[in-house]
Amino acid sequence: MSYSSSLGTGVTNTRLRSPAHLADVSGMCAACTADCAGPCEIGLSAVRGPEALLPFAADINQFASEKRYPLDFSHFNINGRVFGSEGLPADADQATYPNADIGASFGLGDSAVPIDAPFILPAMAKLAWREYFAGAALAGVPVVIGEDVIAKDPGLVMDGRRVVGSPLVAEMVEAFRRYHRGPGDVVLQANYDDELHRVLEFAVTRLGVKSVELKFGQAAKGIQGMGRVPDIEQASRFKRLGWLVLPDPDDPAVRAAYERGVGPVFEKIGRLPMWTPESLVRRVAELRAMGARRVCFKTGPFDPRDLATILRVASEAGVDLVTIDGAGGGTGHSPVKMMNEWGIPTVTLECVVRSILERLKRDGKPLPPVAMAGGFATEDQVYKGLALGSPYVGLIALGRASMAAAFAGRNVGESLKKGVVPKEYARFGSSVEELFADLRVLKSRYGDDAAGIPTGAIGVFSYLHRVADGLRMLMALNRKFALRYIARDDIVPLTDEAARATGLATYEDLLDRA
């Protein structure tokens, strides 16, 4: 059995001619006939070349890995206890799941801000971003504006290669701030090109942004970002503003070929970060000096040696949060095979990260707060992620699922505006007030302003409300009524592979200790 996906997938808008007869070793049809027009990925490559590396219509869709990893959170079950109570008195009237405390914090020391649940919405800067950012504010959790926003901003103002005005960044920040009521914050992420353009300086000094994030990579995880630029004048503009553009649009031979309709298309290529530990420590200090209250890192599932270096730098620099993204997640701007075949799967990655943090602790080093990302969507996965990383992992990132909730809420709202009640929800009523159950909660918090909340943002709030309540229920199941009591023995491996990888006690081990 192959763990990898076939060469026919909705991610690239391809299909196999005979999917029932698959050659596992290649992902191709076992019988490749001479009369086939090639609806599969090989055929798409024959027609579109390197364009076939990337997901289909990534500007209007989001995607994740289809690889069936040999170890994921389904290999664990959540434990449950009958006796006692931690965090609340052992009183049946008090020790009840709505009283479970899932409040957490974002940031270190005096810079910490409270958050209503142990979630962070990781970097996005496309699709239903207004609803995504607003929904995070409604839910009282931090949210990250993704990289490379300025490249999409038609109103961008530059002084040479330095950003001095970006209406789009300002609009994204305001989408959160409009509904911010105290808990959480909006975080602006910067990749290496953003750093060269001094995006964070602009945001901190001009927009009053207090939380920033440095990214260790490009695109969804770590590979170089890339995007085709169909027009030579736009390609030349990007080059003038400091981006890498290939081929050189200002080369007379390239321009002449373009005018004849020949030659390669232009690509704007993101620079790979060339940080050193020393430059990172220095950069964190610079960001704090200019007014950033919280400085964060975002990294993917790189070689464990690099992860160890990143966490040591975070410890030395006093970084406020390190979000570490496991293989299997993603939003769709990375090449398909990179999303499927690169990096450490989330369960294994969390074990690696925990081991590194334990070494730092033994060495007497301060520990940076850590969030895990990579395919989390529901409360059971959140609970397992917190338990597996306990006591070092304090937040779980809910990215693709939160964006899916934004889509769903927005689309339902748009249907209602047209007088159409989606048949899936008609049993609940026919108005926004009847369909969106949590609008009552938001009215109690925002009063008359609740009427203007986009239905997509309500969707994000309601989705996170569901996950938060589900998390409370699982905590109560284990008689643990505050996050700090969640521990590794709250989950039990079901397979030998899960037990070997994590070192957790199996049910047989727990019986031996009874």
Image (spheres, helix red, strand yellow):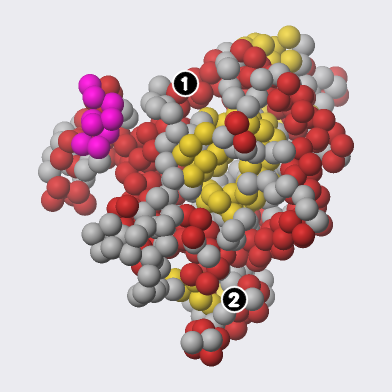
* Mark 2 vs mark 1, CA separation in Å: 45 Å
Q: Which residue is mark 1?
A: 174
Q: Residue at 62% of width from left, 36% of height from top?
A: 109
Secondary element under disc 1, as helix, strand or loop, is helix
Q: Amino acid at mark 2?
A: Leu
Magenta: main secondary structure: helix
Q: Nearer the viewer, residue 455 or 42?
A: 455
Q: Residue at 37% of width from left, 34% of height from top?
A: 138
Q: Earlier in the sequence, mark 2 or mark 1?
A: 1
Residue 124: percent from left, percent from top = 54, 37
Q: Is 48 above or below relative to 138?
A: below
Visible in this render: residue 505?
A: yes
Visible in this render: residue 9?
A: no
Q: Tell me the quarter of the picture where residue 233 sits.
A: top right
Q: Label 2 neighbourhood size at 10 Å, few (<14), some (14-19), many (20+)?
A: some
Q: Tell me the quarter of the picture where residue 229 sits.
A: top right
Secondary element under disc 2, as helix, strand or loop, is loop
Quadrant in which the N terminus appears = bottom right
Residue 63: assigned label: none
Question: Which span is picked out in magenta?
Answer: 440-448
Q: Amino acid at mark 1?
A: Glu
Q: Nearer the viewer, residue 201 or 247?
A: 201
Residue 38: percent from left, percent from top = 57, 60
Q: Which residue is mark 2?
A: 504
Q: Residue at 17% of width from left, 36% of height from top?
A: 433
Residue 307: percent from left, percent from top = 76, 53
Point out the frontmost of discs 2 and 1.
2
Q: Is 90 above or below relative to 236?
A: below
Q: Residue at 85% of width from left, 41% of height from top?
A: 277
Query: Magenta includes 347?
Result: no
Q: Label 1 neighbourhood size at 10 Å, few (<14), some (14-19), many (20+)?
A: some
